Image (cartoon, rainbow, N blue to C red):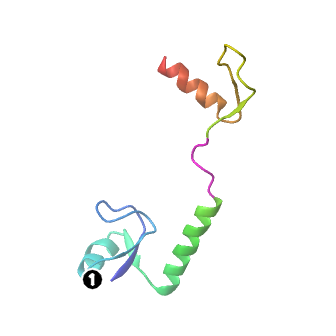
Amino acid sequence: MKVILLKNVQNLGEKDEIKEVKDGFARNFLIKKGLAKAATDKDVLAVEKRKEENRVCSPPLFSFPRVQGTPQKGRESHRVTGPRAFFLVLVVVVLL
């Protein structure tokens, strides 16, 4: 039986994955506990569409800060700008 996971299930998969499991496991455990629902064609298309939208619209979790300027002769200084500058400074301070 094909099911769509509604929550992360240990040793099976993550939310919104479509899995093939035995009928008894699906009916007696996954569906009863609200961890999954039976996968119909309509539901499968909706999940795939939602995954595609999330993949296209979601911003990257981390991007490297931009560096401006060129290092001066004999010095290795750069000026970091952008939204990650504070995070970079915070990490450096915490590690020291």
Q: Quadrant of residue 90?
A: top right
Q: Quadrant of residue 20?
A: bottom left
Residue at point 31%, 72% (across, down)? 30
Image location (x, y in percent) of residue 23 = 27, 83
Up/down of 15 relative to 64, above or below: below
The single residue placed furthest to the front in the displayed view is 73
Q: Quadrant of residue 28?
A: bottom left
The single residue placed furthest to the top in the displayed view is 74
Of residues 3 and 93, the one drawn nearer to the viewer in this rendering: 93
Of residues 37 and 85, the one drawn nearer to the viewer in this rendering: 85
As drawn, is 50 to the left or to the right of 9? right
The single residue placed furthest to the bottom in the displayed view is 41
What secondary structure is marked by label 1? helix
What residue does disc 1 label? 23
Up/down of 57 relative to 82, above or below: below
Image location (x, y in percent) of residue 88 = 59, 29
Residue at point 37%, 70% (across, down)? 34
Of residues 53 and 77, the one drawn nearer to the viewer in this rendering: 77
Up/down of 64 relative to 51, above or below: above
Residue at point 36%, 68% (across, down)? 35
| Residue 55 painted magenta | no
As drawn, is 82 to the left or to the right of 91? right
In the picture, the quarter occupied by the N terminus is bottom left
Residue at point 27%, 72% (across, down)? 29
Amino acid of disc 1 = Asp
- Tell me where the magenta segment starts and ends, as one range: 58-63
